[in-house]
Image (tube, grey):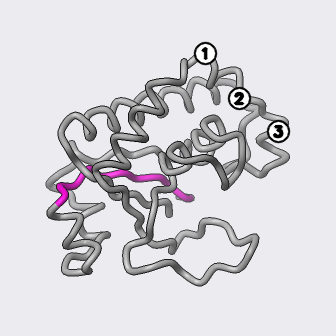
């Protein structure tokens, strides 16, 4: 199956309950009855982060938050330097204000610019997951998911929603 990116819009009230761990983040993130408010990024998540930030794991605010999110629900895990996202990574969140900042930043980047940043050799060098970027159709695959991501953030910003994110 591999590592898949998921984002879910949540109300500010639900976000507070998640932060206080009154509600399980994964039960909300993968709730079947609320599918239309969940965005599934498949395995495009790492490539989208790379196109937005030019790095495998780092980046500048607010774009660094677009895929990886902000603070971890339940606190930060004890990662060592050089550790990467793992399948059991914690769910992360963005506040309403952070969602608005990410949405505004995404709207400022022309799709043509992102497409120019799609450099399979550099992506392979940085080990951008899942490492199949030389294959035909990969740019279109990533851009389709990027468009969904940008629209999803715009919808969340317009509706005053926070965001729950997970890669695993």
Residue under pointer 1: 112
N-term mark: 1 or 3: 1
Task: Identify the magenta region.
Answer: 3-12
* Residue 65 sits inside the magenta stretch: no
* CB under 8 Å between discs 1 and 3: no
Q: Which mark is residue 11?
A: none
User: Looking at the image, which residue is at 46% across and 56% down?
Assistant: 69
Q: Please tell me whether residue 22 is drawn above or below residue 93 in the rendered image.
A: below
Residue under pointer 2: 118
Q: Please tell me whether residue 127 is drawn above or below residue 151 in the rendered image.
A: below
User: Looking at the image, which residue is at 54% across and 47% down?
Assistant: 61
Q: How many marks?
A: 3
Q: Which mark is residue 122?
A: 3
- Indicate left or right for 72 with 83 as reference: left
What is the CA distance from the residue labelled 3 to the residue labelled 2? 8 Å
- Indicate left or right for 101 with 157 as reference: right
- Indicate left or right for 33 with 1 as reference: left
Residue 23's image quarter?
Answer: bottom left
N-term mark: 2 or 1: 1
**Residue 44: x, y in percent?**
55, 42
User: Looking at the image, which residue is at 22% across and 48% down?
Assistant: 161
């Amino acid at each position: 199956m591999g590592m898949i990116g998921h984002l879910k819009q949540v109300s500010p009230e639900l976000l507070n309950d998640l932060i206080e761990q009154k509600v399980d983040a994964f039960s909300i993130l993968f709730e079947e009855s609320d599918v239309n408010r969940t965005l599934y990024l498949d395995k495009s998540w790492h490539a989208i982060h790379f196109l937005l930030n030019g790095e495998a794991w780092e980046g500048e605010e607010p774009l660094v938050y677009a895929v990886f999110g902000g603070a971890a629900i339940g606190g930060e895990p004890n990662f060592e330097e050089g550790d990467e996202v793992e399948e059991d990574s914690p769910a992360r969140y963005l506040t309403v204000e952070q969602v608005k900042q990410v949405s505004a930043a995404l709207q400022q980047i022309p799709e043509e610019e992102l497409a120019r940043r799609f450099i399979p050799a550099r992506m392979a060098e940085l080990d951008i997951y899942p490492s199949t970027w030389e294959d035909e159709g990969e740019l279109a695959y990533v851009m389709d998911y990027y468009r969904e991501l940008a629209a999803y953030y715009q919808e969340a910003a317009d509706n005053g929603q926070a965001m729950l994110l997970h890669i695993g």
